[in-house]
Amino acid sequence: MSRIHARTLRFSAGLCLRIPAAVGQGRAVCPPAAQRSAPVAVAGSGPARGRRRHRPVSRLVSAMAGVVVAGGLAIPAASAAPGGLAFAGCVGDLAGCAATSPANALDGSSAVTVVGNQVYTASSWEGTVSHFTMDLAGNLTYDGCLGNLPGCTALSSDLAISTPTALAAANGQLYVASADSQTVSHFTIDPAGNLTFADCYGSGDGCTPVTPADALKLADGLAITPDGQQLYTTSYTGSVVSHFTIDAAGNLAFAGCIGDLAGCTSTSPAGALDGAWGVAITPDGQHLYAASLMGNAISHFTIDSAGNLTFAGCIGSLTGCATTSPAGALNGADALVVTPDGHHLYAAATTANAVSHFTIDPAGNLNYAGCIGDLFGCATMAPGALDGADALAITSDGAHVYAAGGSGHAISHFTMDAAGNLNYAGCIGDHAGCATTSPAGALVGVNGLAVTGDGAHLYATAFTGNAVSHFTIAGFTTANPPGGPYRRICHFNCNPLPGGLVPGGLLPRTCLFGCHPLPSGILLRTLP
């Protein structure tokens, strides 16, 4: 695992598993003892707060420099072009960021997701999920946390989110994958965005077990079908993708798994899901892609009407898979994102330090179309900015892709041409040639990215920076989202339209919450 951006998870048995960073869902790590206080002893089967995690890397971010004033906003010179990022502040346990209470609620931040005007982050160090509300300018207000950290709302199952690594939301529900406790947990979201713990599946105390028992071992990636009825999670250690159905109330039911683990449906070749990590679903809900961090491949699955997966092939370095050129483009494949039109997939690879582009044919098959990054044979960009490529995000119009370099300590911005090819457009973070942030350290250990539905804001979690940072995206505002100024972004709990009208028609859907405020009396179109 040389040159892999390593992260460490310490399990209850006292062992540490070093795994590469991936998919922007943040992975728990422990810095050297000199950088953190000594672990706190926890009696019995207590939560992860007593199990410190190490990431043996150091990161600094230099102060902001060079701005262009546009419309009264200070925008870094390198970020003034459409889609460019401008640092707008941070929240967390870092000098210069807005504080939280408890102060360490964001220590080891590991994942971020946006649900309407609510933002949720996970802390794999402290075992918490934090809630923020977003104002119209995208600024975050901290609204509390759940977990076993003193000062957070405690859960009935104290191991349900001991090391949360991934977040996914649909229909007023939030789901959390936790590596240490080997669980997927379910929370309901009220109209104010507050979370209430509902239940959990896996090995955690009080959670419903799954069969086979290791199907959620080191649970990591999460993805939900567009209709909100199916959920999939990856298991790094089990080397599987597990399937859950979601009922009308948001409750989960385990429906099986596919991969190397005994008791799961197998793949051919057998190692296609070794170290299963990132996962993504096409907008039509008919195809799923899973990244194999140890198999150095991406697997394609078809999804039937019941949500069951059928293996349909793979691409990468693994024998039996279709190949890429250069051959190592998917070494350490971890993060995946599909374009809103379903025609392209992008994959970050933490060992290759590159982002690869695939076209998706009508049958869902992937066709390799090139890469960008440090790997010989890929298109070039700022050297090192994609080191430890760790997370991907895309704007809702599909025009801009963002990639987190966990070892490069930066977020890179790419535009795409009509064929879906990526063109490097700049970076921000602690890397030569990138725009900078203030305070320094805001992107130290960047590992999670999320873009708002209106395309105006990006949020990034930083594990070692212990913070979530806010960036504005040039060219987009809440008054002028992709698609024009009169498209309302409604995220969930939307009632069906009458008479079979298609979302996006002239009549708006009735949304209970998760919609940006609108001027009174204006009839707006909705995004599906």
Image (cartoon, rainbow, N blue to C red):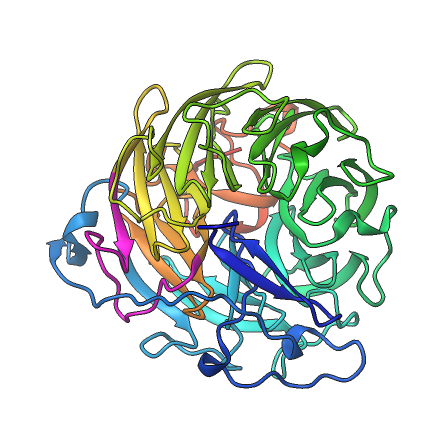
* Position of 504 relative to 187 (above/below): above
The foreground one among 264 and 104 is 264
Q: Position of residue 482 (x, y in %)?
A: 35, 36
Range drawn in magenta? 425-446
The foreground one among 515 and 167 is 167
Membership of 440 in magenta stretch: yes
Judge whether residue 374 can be spotted in this image.
Answer: yes
Name the side, left or right, on which 437 lies relative to 3. Answer: left
Name the side, left or right, on which 332 lies relative to 256. Answer: left
The outermost residue toward the front is 2
Q: Write the residue at 32% across / 46% down.
A: 412
Judge whether residue 494 can be spotted in this image.
Answer: no
For the image, the number of numbered tags is 0
Membership of 432 in magenta stretch: yes
* Position of 167 relative to 325 (above/below): below
Q: Position of residue 202 (x, y in %)?
A: 80, 56
Q: Position of residue 200 (x, y in %)?
A: 78, 58
**Magenta-highlighted stretch: main secondary structure?**
loop
Q: Quadrant of residue 420?
A: top left
Q: Write the residue at 48% across / 71% down.
A: 142
Q: Write the residue at 27% across / 49% down.
A: 427
* Position of 151 relative to 195 (above/below): below
Name the side, left or right, on which 198 lies relative to 397. Answer: right
Name the side, left or right, on which 68 lies relative to 422. Answer: left
Q: Position of residue 137 (x, y in %)?
A: 33, 58
Q: Write the residue at 62% across / 47% down.
A: 221
